[in-house]
Amino acid sequence: IDYYNNEHVLKNYKFTPEMLKENVVPTPKGLIEYACNKYDLVFQPISPEILKLVLLERTTAKFTRKGLKLTSKLYYFNYDYQNEMLIGKKTVIVAYDAENINKIWMIENLVYIPFFLIQERYQDLSMSDYEKYQEIEKGLFNQYKESELQAKIDLNKQIKGVLDGKRV
């Protein structure tokens, strides 16, 4: 962030003749300083927590009866949203940290409302670790699917044999 705000040169930005005359630095910081000086603007301070939330990735999640669902992960809700939970199917915009899936934030009227992961087995995983875990779990189930099917066939044969009065 520091590099892009302070050092990144805006090659495609179209400077006005006035800006060129005043030797405005062609970086985001230079443009902001120019605008603040020209229009007497003052920046409002922002807390590091709010800055982090603003920079998080965005996606959509859906309210279900079990919780706020993001992909296959469930997050428990704030009781203020009990109606959305009971009705379900409402889609909302959420912010999430790809490095830790323990918490997501629903964004409502520019307010970040935290929701917490229900499934303890996924605690402290990153999004990529969670996806790897899901793939391994899926592979494990697929690995035994064929043997389970064969066992069901054998069981059906045994049941049919008992019903026909034969032993298999």
Image (spheres, helix red, strand yellow):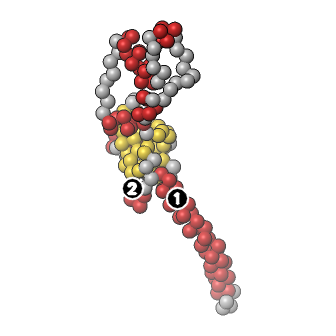
Quarter where residue 36 is shown: top left
Image quarter of the C terminus: bottom right
Is residue 156 something that shows in the picture? no
First along the sequence among labels 2 and 1? 2
In the rendered view, would you say 164 is above or below 91?
Answer: below
User: As shown in the figure, which amino acid type bears the numbered disc 2?
Assistant: Asp
The residue positioned 52% from the left and 24% from the top of the image is: 10
Amino acid on which disc 1 is placed: Lys
Q: Residue at x 38, y 37 (%)?
A: 53
Is residue 119 shown left or right of residue 157? Answer: left
Above or below: residue 131 compared with residue 59: below
Q: Provide residue 138's location: percent of width, then percent of height.
A: 56, 63
Instruction: State the SS at label 2.
Output: loop
Horizontally, residue 102 falls left or right of residue 134, namely: left
Instruction: Name the foreground residue: 162 vs 128.
Output: 128
> As displayed, is residue 27 above or below residue 156?
above
| Residue 113 percent location from the top left of the image | 36, 39
Q: In terms of image quadrants, where is residue 6?
A: top left
Residue designated by label 1:
132
User: What residue sits 41% from the left and 61% below the top?
Assistant: 121
Rendered image: mark on residue 124:
2
